[in-house]
Image (cartoon, grey):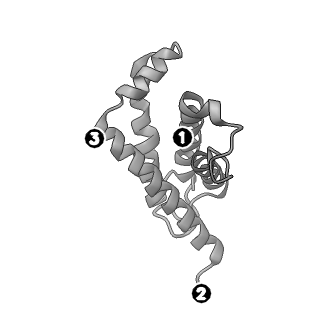
């Protein structure tokens, strides 16, 4: 019999990993110039923009396959906090046109990553339940 908590962890990891990875693929094809510009406008080196590849390519792939799940999830949390800070801070207390939180997508990514960080990968992962970081 399939344990529902391990199945839930798999669904959560796959959903988060795939959806964040799509943003990473966009950065590969479109570049990180916009992010570099936002960083420099906040007084930070534009070269830090390349860390988006860790947060939106490496970490999601690790989440999808289920190895180093907890560190990958924490990287995703940091990535989302930086994205909210750089782009969406002005909207943090706003509601959207349909009444939902204006940052519901970013919030869902952030809180799903937090859940993965605390729950681990589960048994349906390459790392399995006995993996040190899963």
Q: Is residue 44 visible?
A: no
Q: Is residue 106 above or below residue 38?
A: below
Q: Which mark is residue 29?
A: 3
Labels 2, 3: front one: 3
Labels 3, 1: front one: 3
- Answer with mark 3 or mark 1, whichever residue precedes in sequence: 3
Q: Which mark is residue 1?
A: 2
Residue closer to the observer: 102 or 29: 102
Could you say where residue 127 lies in the image, as x and y percent from the top left? 49, 60
Looking at the image, the residue that sits furthest to the front is: 97
Q: Alpha carbon of mark 3 to alpha carbon of mark 1: how far?
A: 22 Å
Residue closer to the observer: 97 or 108: 97
Q: Is residue 35 above or below residue 92?
A: above
Question: For the point 58% across and 73% down, which residue is it?
Answer: 7
For the residue carrying disc 3, how many other residues have a C-alpha within 10 Å: few (<14), some (14-19), or many (20+)? few
Query: How many numbered marks does the figure carry?
Result: 3
Q: Is residue 69 above or below residue 39?
A: below
Pick the quarter of the image with the N terminus: bottom right
Could you say where residue 115 lies in the image, as x and y percent from the top left? 65, 54
Q: Is residue 40 above or below residue 99?
A: above
Query: Which residue is the site of mark 1?
Result: 75
For the residue carrying disc 1, how many other residues have a C-alpha within 10 Å: few (<14), some (14-19), or many (20+)? many
Question: For the point 57% across and 50% down, which residue is it?
Answer: 105
Q: Alpha carbon of mark 2 to alpha carbon of mark 3: how far?
A: 43 Å
Q: Quadrant of residue 78?
A: top right
Q: Is residue 33 visible?
A: yes
- Answer with mark 1 or mark 2, whichever residue precedes in sequence: 2
Labels 1, 2: front one: 1
Q: Are dots 3 and 1 in contact, CB under 8 Å? A: no
Q: Are dots 1 and 2 in contact, CB under 8 Å? A: no
Question: For the point 46% across and 16% down, which residue is it?
Answer: 40
């Amino acid at each position: 019999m399939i344990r529902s908590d391990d199945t839930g962890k798999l669904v959560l990891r796959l959903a988060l990993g795939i959806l964040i990875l799509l943003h990473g693929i966009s950065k590969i094809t479109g570049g990180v110039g916009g992010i570099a510009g936002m960083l420099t406008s906040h007084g930070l080196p534009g070269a830090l923009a390349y860390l988006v590849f860790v947060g939106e390519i490496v970490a999601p792939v690790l989440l999808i396959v289920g190895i180093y799940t907890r560190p990958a999830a924490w990287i995703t949390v940091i990535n989302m906090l930086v994205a909210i800070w750089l782009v969406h801070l002005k909207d943090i207390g706003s509601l959207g046109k349909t009444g939902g939180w204006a940052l519901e997508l970013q919030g869902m990514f952030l809180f799903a990553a937090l859940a993965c960080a605390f729950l681990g990968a589960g048994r349906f992962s390459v790392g399995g339940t006995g993996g040190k970081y899963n």
